[in-house]
Each structure stands twice: as structure tokens, then as C-alpha cells.
Image: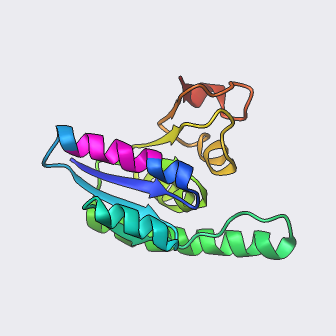
Amino acid sequence: MKIIFAGGGTGGHFMAGLSTAEEIRSRFHEAEIIFFGSDKKFERRCVERKGFQYRQVRAEKWGKSLKHMFACVSSLVLGIFDSLFAVRKFNPDIVVGLGGYASVAPVITAKLLGIPSVVLEQNVIPGKANRFLSRWLMRCTAIGVDRSSGLTMQRLFA
């Protein structure tokens, strides 16, 4: 079993994914797991300390100014392009989006390549990335999420 965990930008998204990856590894010792995350050194350090591989994804947080929006879209296009090569090379069975701006490109890439994908949402109010990605997902696993929070009803399985 090969799994990509994609996300980051904030610790809340990331730590939930790291805990999930550890649980999978404890149950399935042969599982190959890699994390795709942002350029934050904290994320890389946490992942590598737990014995997982880490790959940085180009990603920018969505901003309110036109300049920030352009940077985000440009970064997303480059992130998808980078992710296409990395995802094909790793050839995962599933991509797990953790939320945060670093999850968008790998999850979109999985969709483009026909690889099943899910998003884990542990917050009561889903973030922008998970609301955006929920339209294209095979499944969105949410715990205690208010159904009026922006996740599409067809994709929300509490």
C-alpha cells in the first residue's frame, strides 16, 4: 500500500495527518508513506523524525490582494506540474489531503491521474482548501463539521 499525505501550512492540519500516518504504519508495516507539504521547516522536521519521507510542494496561501491571488494561482499551476511527476513516480494507491494550501496541488493532481483521494477535516468550520477540494473528491471525512460550513453535501460523509 502506497499513500501520499498532502497538506500543511498550519500545524493543526499537519499533526492530524501525521497521527493518521503513524496509525496506518502500525497496522500495515509494509505501507509506504510520503508527505507532500509546504516550505515550513517545522513540517519537514516532524515528518522526518517519525521516519517518513517528505517532499516540498510549491504552494502559496490565498490572499486578498490581486498580487497575492496571482501568486497563489501561479504557485498552484507550478505545484500541479511538479506534483504530476512526483505522484507518477511514487504511484500511490490513494492521496490523503490534510487541508491547508499545500494540499491543493497534490489532490488536484490525483484527480487528474485518476488516483482515489480523500480529505480529512477535523475542524468544525472547514478551511478554504478543503471547501475548494470537496467538489472533486471521492470522499471527505469530517468529524463534527457543521453541514452549513461550505462542504458540498454530496461529498460530506460524517
* Residue 95 seen: no
Q: How many marks?
A: 0
Please say whether residue 86 is one of the residues in the magenta stretch.
Answer: no
Side of 91 relative to 148 (left or right): left
Q: Nearer the viewer, residue 89 or 24?
A: 24
Q: Position of residue 157 (x, y in %)?
A: 52, 24
Side of 155 relative to 51 (left or right): right
Q: Nearer the viewer, residue 124 or 119?
A: 124
Kindly identify the residue that appears in the image at 59 percent across and 25 percent down. 144
> Which residues are the magenta region?
16-25
Kindly identify the residue that appears in the image at 40 percent across and 53 percent down. 5
Note whether 113 is above or below 144 in the view shown: below
Quarter residue 27 falls in = top left
Q: Position of residue 25 (x, y in %)?
A: 22, 46
Kindly identify the residue that appears in the image at 39 percent across and 70 percent down. 55
Dominant SS of magenta comes to: helix
Side of 27 relative to 138 (left or right): left
Q: Position of residue 98 (x, y in %)?
A: 50, 48
Note whether 80 is above or below 123 in the view shown: below
